[in-house]
Amino acid sequence: MGRFQFLVFLFLLSTHVLVAQKVTEFQQNFQTTIRPTTSPIKIDGVLDEAVWATSQVAKDFYKKYPNDIGAPKQQTEARYTYDDKNLYFAFKVYDSGAFVTTSLKRDNGHDGNDGIGIILDPLNLKSNGFYFVVSALNVQSEDQLTNSMEKGPEWSWDTKWFSATKNYGTYWIAEIMIPFKSIRYDPSQKKWGINFLRVDAKNNEYSAWTKVPVNFRSYDIGYTGVLNWEGAIPKLTNNIILQPYITGDANEDLENNKSLYASGNAGFDAKLTLNSSLNLDLTVNPDFSQVEVDKQVSNLTRFDIFLPEKRNFFMENSDLFSNFGIPPIRPFYSRTIGLDKEGNRIPILFGARLSGNLSPRTRIGLMNMQTGRQGNYSPENFSALTLQKSVLKRSVIKSYFLNRENYISAAEEKANPLDRYGRNAGVSFEYSNPQGTVSSWTNYNLAMKPGINDLNAYYEAGIGYDTRTLGMVLDFSNVGKNYYTDMGYVQRINNYDAVRDTLIRVGFKHIFTELSYKIMPSKGLIGKIEFNFQNYAAFNPDNTLNENQLGFTFKTDFKNTSFFKAQLSNYAINLLYPISFTNGTPLPAAQYQFTNLSFSYMSDMRKLFSWFTELTFGQFYNGNIQSYSSGITLRRRPNLNLSVRGEFNKIELPYPYGSANLFLISPRIEYNFSTQLFWTTFLQYNTQANNFNINSRLQYRYRPMSDFFLVYTDNYFTDPLFKNKNRALIFKFSYWFNL
């Protein structure tokens, strides 16, 4: 039996593994009961309804951050009830009456904002759930949670819910109504996982109803308490959401000699609830013209940079598809769909995504997207299927199958048969002990291309350990040179030869090691001191060293949100092909060893003015480098956010390899007129990319989940200075129907 077949067998076998108990030992200490009400509740921030005087109260919150020692400076009380249509929550948040908030913009999240959060796990299986956040100024954010989240919430999931806040001087009130049809649940499951989060930005404190260890995120669904339902839970009815849109735009493309022209478009998104835990999302002629442009960065590496996905359709439930592999090696990378390598849009004709739970412990994700023809780009079809099975208490077995089909002509297929299709499959097992302190993972991935039969696998294994003070990661990966990922991203596999101006595929192995030690003083100005050691070693297929990166980092987080960091890095590189970072002669293939040192500091982010600076200096291949990065932010809370970030890289290499001065300047202006009207302008001047970009966006949320956008974008060369490339003015109007 081959490795891939063995892992498939392991996935099927997992369906017979005993499930965890409904109430864990941790949850025994955190239980509360929700009782129904028949009286109407007005969401106005005034707790004058009789039910709030008789409902149970979750209080005596535990301090979570910057450490979990002692009680929080300000306490919080949460109340809850429900009727036949909605869940209701009421929070009494003790405070001084002066609020810290970063923005009035929706989906701004919880960091840096005085606010509260609700974590719901309707299946109480610690596998996935919902997160609702409202700030003291009634700014809403929401997202879906999973037990395998590598990053924090991206606030990409949208649903309709209602809230109101009111300031009473020594405390503030938040009232929240979440329609049952806005979430998914099993009406027969009468024990839900729940937790409440308080962010006290003025004191830089996080607290939670349950005692969440300091080394875990506050919203970790592995540390929820239990919400016991006293009465019957309303059954879900069919829920259909339709969101049509229309757009109009005027474009001028001088770079390609296209004069001013106008066009229009229309399409829709739809969401259908198939049952209590399964959703179908449909999109026809989707439009992402309102999505913010990519943040430009200076690239001083030999490889492509991973850019984050910003399109909501691909971000919702993205963990189902995108969390296979590790950050430098992703079998699925949604930016391969509807975008070319330069970030230009390829039209998507239609698509569908099925996601949710087939059973309490089995999740499914199924996606199909069809693109149209764009210039020399042929139409393509992208399909993705994933199954995830929860086993033991906090572990999961996952499998996937990906397929990209290209509708190229017979002549194009004959010229390059590998373009015809690309398929990938894989299985992984991710273990976590009940406390979440010990983790391990292993996966096997296979690529399928016409005529490719060997060196087409990627496999990996690793282990991690994370406690209050000590952290450790050890990871090993092996990537064959024929491991193609038409729907994915592999950072090191394509090596650029600057002399021949071509890409050469080279397989590799790597070993990544990380050790960290944390000290969290209970008193004084310092919140956390961390010492970190990292070593990344990459090897060629013949096991010779390709690259070794060794880093030592010291970081101090202060309780006033500022931090200081120092890092010493050493590189040993066996350069396989010539590479160029300047306009001079490319560096020859040879062995290089160099060291540099960096310092960075971030000031208190709660102040009217905050700033950061970073300095890097030392060696760079056979020369030297000096890098300066700094920025300043002005916040006239809660309306104005003005920031300017600048970066300068000076590379000096010996003759004849040249030198380079690279500038990146990016001012950003955000003005929030209210919680419904926002204006953002983003400017980016990047000499490395030879581009100066202006992106200005006005958003008016005229009713819940319904928007009007007006977007202006303009691109210029930096050399010759300010010669226009293209510009466009776009409007988009969308409306959210609950059918």
Image: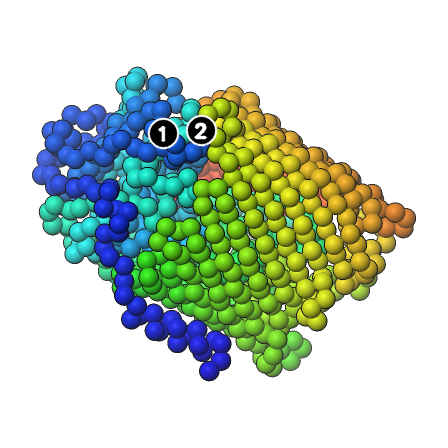
Q: How is the image coloured?
A: rainbow
C-alpha span from label 2 to label 1: 9 Å
Q: Is residue 612 above or below residue 420?
A: above
Residue 402 percent coordinates (x, y) = 47, 69
Categorize mark 1 by other alpha carbons within 10 Å: few (<14), some (14-19), many (20+).
few
Of marks 2 and 1, which one's residue comes earlier in the chain? 1
**Label 1 secondary element:** loop
Residue 721 percent coordinates (x, y) = 75, 39
Report the disc number at residue 522: 2
Tell whether 392 sits left or right of 84.
right
- Residue nearest the observer in this picture, 232 or 519: 519
Q: Single out the residue that lies furthest toward the top.
A: 169
Name which residue lies at 72% across and 48% down.
570
Hey, which quadrant is residue 643 in on the image? top right
Name which residue lies at 69% across and 68% down.
543
- Residue nearest the observer in this picture, 659 or 76: 76
Residue 660 percent coordinates (x, y) = 80, 43
Q: Single out the residue that lies furthest toward the left.
A: 38
- Residue nearest the observer in this picture, 98 or 469: 469
- Amino acid at dot 2: Ser
- Residue nearest the observer in this picture, 396 or 466: 466
Tell whether 572 sits left or right of 341.
right
Residue 203 visible in the shown view: yes
Report the disc number at residue 70: 1
Tell whether 247 sits left or right of 17.
right
Whether residues under marks 2 and 1 lie with C-beta atoms below 8 angstroms apart, the answer is yes
Name which residue lies at 29% across and 37% down.
209
Residue 270 visible in the shown view: no
